[in-house]
Image (cartoon, grey):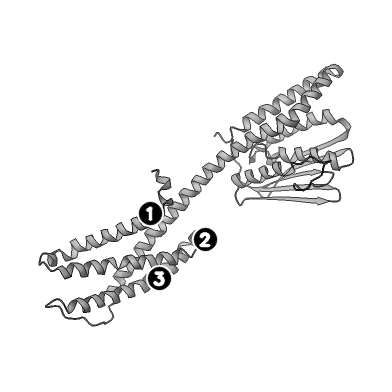
Amino acid sequence: MKLKHWYNKPYTFWILNTCGWLAYFFYNLYIMHHNKLREGIPLVLLRIFLLYMFGFPLSLMLRALYNKIKHQAYSVFSLSAIVVPASIVGAVAWFGFEKILIVVFGHFQSGILPASFHFSFWNILGWGLVLIAWSILYFLIKFWISLDQQLERTATAQIQAHDIQSQMLQSQLNKHFLFNSLNSIRSLVDENVEQAKEMVTELSDFLRYFMVSRDHTLIPLKDELEAIRNYLNIEKKRFEEKLDISIISDPLAEDFLVPGLLIHPLVENAIKYGMKTSPLPLAIRIRTALEDGKLRIEVFNTGKWIQPDVADKKIIAGTGTGLENVRLRLANAFPDKHHLEIEEKEDGVHISLLIKQELGSRDKN
């Protein structure tokens, strides 16, 4: 059984907790009571067992309490404010149980008189420290499990990110873009050889970017923008005056690390669906900027926003797939550090993406 899966078993807690309290019982049996055991008094052994194993049901009560709180959201101080009082209450109960055992077993053991229930600070402190130690160990294991699960989710997210990129490459290039680009190149060969050569080069660079970006989790924004320029140049040769393109990029933002093919689905949808809802020429505006250490990416197109669930025979469905891929990859790369907003206004569709992430070098993974 792999170590990372042992905590998923329903009986794991019971095994660890039982073994822990048994070890605590045998330790005290050897250290504190081995002399009495040599006297051969069976009731002493039973009383010791009941006394030290009383921590087992107390630990179950503490566990029930701790399971009701979200420990990840609490600081050490906040957890201490819960653990210490709960352990003190358990220690008082343990102290009372100890006195009951002395009274009950005192009736059966000669030479042992029933003890009074007078308050004993040091006894309660001792039991309380035992329960606090159990609570600390319990939360340490819980935190370790949470960390291990987070690392496993991160590894899974990276694999999913690569799978999504592969799916995008197959579904988008093979079905639409590549077919249309090759047809355009074929037409240009007879009309304008130089433009045909330029288009072949741009298509080659764009395809190379698709392949290279699959091998990196994050890449510099400038590489993504260069691929977008190649893509738009190809589309411009296809649509000519029907397409009006503008890209404004802040040089300070170009070293910002983003997932490869992050902007492409947004631009592709802007052209694909903008051509069907916008008066010509279709305007595409892309802007990137660095604002207070955050990267802002804006993609605008004239036309209307198409909801993914709208069934319109004149408009090919599929808007939701590319956008959902963008959301998934943002969630994988920048959990809780991004904001994606889509607005439809009178002049067109505005998509704004804000990412908070440290600048860094190219990911070598």
Residue 34 spot, x, y in % from top left: 15, 63
The residue wearing badge 2 is 73
How far apart in space, not on screen, are marks 2 and 3 (Cα)?
Answer: 19 Å
Residue 86 numbered tag:
3
Residue 220 spot, x, y in % from top left: 64, 37
How far apart in space, not on screen, are marks 1 and 3 (Cα)?
Answer: 24 Å
Residue 296 numbered tag:
none
Q: Is 43 on the left or on the right of 163, as rendered?
A: left
Give the amino acid at mark 1: Thr
Chain-order first, disc 2 or disc 3: 2
Quadrant location of the N terminus?
top left
Give the amino acid at mark 3: Ala
Viewer-nearest residue: 33 or 319: 319
> Vertically, is 336 above or below 205?
below
Viewer-nearest residue: 216 or 149: 149
Quadrant location of the C terminus?
top right
Mark 1 neighbour density, 10 Å: few (under 14) some (14–19) many (20 or more): few
Secondary structure under the numbered disc 3 in the rendered image: helix
The residue wearing badge 1 is 12
Q: Is 198 on the left or on the right of 21, as rendered?
A: right
Mark 3 neighbour density, 10 Å: few (under 14) some (14–19) many (20 or more): some
Give the amino acid at mark 2: Ala
